[in-house]
Image (cartoon, rainbow, N blue to C red):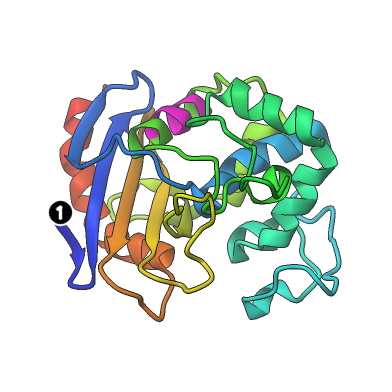
Amino acid sequence: MALASARAEAACTAFADALTGKVLRQDGVCDQRITPASTFKIAISLMGYDSGFLENTESPALPFRDGYPDWIASWKATTDPASWMKNSVVWYSQRITESLGKERFARYVHAFGYGNEDVSGAPGKQDGLTWSWLSSSLKISPLEQLAFLAKIVRRELPVSPLAYEMTARLTEGATLSNGWKVHGKTGTGFAVQADGSNGSEDRGPAIGWFVGWAAKGSRSIVFVRQIQDEKKEPTYAGPRAREEFLRELPAALDSLSLQVG
């Protein structure tokens, strides 16, 4: 698993037993904190359902408005929770966090023990409530992602049962050929510069994530794949990380499941 493709290095691939937290496999550099990018939608989903802003998979359906982030065509439409997660709609995430307010948002991030817990945003911009997880102040390592995901599977976070149930539904993916059910979320981000700005303006080499968990019977394994593009690419790094990882996942789970009770 040293390389995800010729154009992107698999900087980290890691798995852990969700019930014990034991790391089962770790390849690459997995303790370096970077932007969570859209993988943070998993955390935002928990917050949104716990707070009551999100109700189910269809409500609230919010209209697109001029001035919202719109660099993907599917974002220019009325969006509900299901399409928010499927299309990774940035502006819908921002409406959820705005509904919480700065203090409550920060409390959730702290209660989740999420990475460096820094939701201050870019220096001088006061944009932490709406941008801190997007190539900005909030950072998390792959191993910290594993720990956070394991807490979700074990239901150890201070959120409601509905928050867990709906987040699992929104992140539900394919059932693999060997019977494992996968839940996951991609993320694409850019390096944060010394002045706190990010590289999204010039769209240089990207960081890609695919994180989540796989379940089969009583067994659950949490996983992280993080890649680093070697150069600027025309496609998003997160979906590429997911595509490559899912091809490898059935064999990996067959091997790792022998270590899981």
Range of the magenta residues? 146-152
| Element carrying mark 1 | loop
> How many tags in the picture?
1
Q: Quadrant of the C terminus?
A: top left
- The location of residue 245, given as percent across then percent down, is 29, 58
Q: Quadrant of the N terminus?
A: bottom left
In this rendering, the answer to whether 55 lies above or below 5 is above
Question: Is residue 154 among the parts visible in the rendering?
Answer: yes
Q: Nearer the viewer, residue 227 or 25?
A: 227
Question: Is residue 217 among the parts visible in the rendering?
Answer: no
The dominant secondary structure in magenta is helix
In this rendering, the answer to whether 76 lies above or below 48 is below
**Splitting the image into 4 quarters, where does residue 128 fall?**
top right
In this rendering, the answer to whether 211 lies above or below 16 is below
Circle 1 sits on which residue? 1
- Residue 256 left/right relative to 52: left
Tell me what residue is drawn at x 57 percent, y 47 percent: 133
**Splitting the image into 4 quarters, where does residue 108 fall?**
top right
Tell me what residue is drawn at x 29 percent, y 34 percent: 31
Q: Nearer the viewer, residue 215 or 117?
A: 117
Residue type at mark 1: give it.
Met
In this rendering, the answer to whether 181 lies above or below 164 is below
- The location of residue 21, given as percent across then percent down, is 34, 22
